């Protein structure tokens, strides 16, 4: 099955361990990750068969297929206000994270 883009919300109680939840999401198949600890959000891609594995990660409040949400007035997405930080290399997984 092909990869799909997803948006994941980490529950408020788990934000203090956000990095651990993010590592578990990556281990469950999340790739091309961009995350915001402050907002408790992680975006990325997963094989379509991996959605259930992401939903089973402890601390995950919701997993939505990207594009399925309408944000802002009239469906317009809000403009980003934060500058992206330099990517973080994760040697244990061989992936690079973009943290916003």
Image: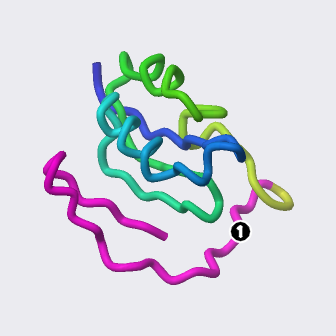
Q: Point out the residue furthest to the front here.
A: 16
Crowd band around label 1 with a 10 angstrom C-alpha radius: few (<14), some (14–19), many (20+):
few
Give the image's coloring scheme.
rainbow
Residue found at x 51% / y 83%: 83
Name above or below for residue 18 compared with residue 45: below
Q: Is residue 46 magenta?
A: no
Image coordinates of residue 84 in percent, x first then y, are 45, 78
Name above or below for residue 87 compared with residue 61: below
Image coordinates of residue 60 in percent, x first then y, are 58, 34
Part of the protein shown in magenta: 75-100
Q: Along the horizontal axis of the image, is 27 left or right of 53?
A: left
Count of numbered marks: 1
Image coordinates of residue 34 in percent, x first then y, are 42, 58
Name above or below for residue 65 compared with residue 79: above
Q: Is residue 93 magenta?
A: yes
Residue that carries the numbered disc 1 in the rendered image? 78
For the N terminus, the image quarter is top left
Q: Nearer the viewer, residue 2 or 97?
A: 97
Q: Nearer the viewer, residue 67 or 63?
A: 63
Q: Nearer the viewer, residue 18 or 62?
A: 18
Q: Along the horizontal axis of the image, is 44 left or right of 14?
A: left
Name above or below for residue 8 compared with residue 72: above
Q: Along the horizontal axis of the image, is 75 left or right of 42?
A: right
Residue found at x 77% / y 54%: 75
Label the magenta part by its dominant secondary structure: loop
Residue found at x 30% / y 43%: 31
Q: Nearer the viewer, residue 75 or 46?
A: 46
Identify the element where label 1 is drawn: loop
Quadrant in the picture for residue 49: top left
Residue found at x 29% / y 33%: 27
Image coordinates of residue 90 in percent, x first then y, are 21, 57
């Amino acid at each position: 099955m092909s990869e799909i883009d997803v948006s994941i919300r980490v529950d408020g109680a788990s934000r203090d361990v956000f990095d651990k939840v993010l590592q578990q999401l990556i281990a469950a198949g999340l790739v091309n990750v961009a995350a915001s600890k402050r907002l408790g959000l992680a975006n990325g891609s997963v094989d379509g068969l991996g959605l259930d594995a992401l939903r089973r990660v402890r601390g995950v409040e919701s997993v939505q297929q990207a594009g399925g949400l309408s944000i802002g007035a009239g469906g317009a997405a809000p403009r980003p206000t934060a500058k992206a930080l330099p990517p973080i290399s994760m040697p244990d997984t061989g992936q690079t994270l973009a943290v916003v």
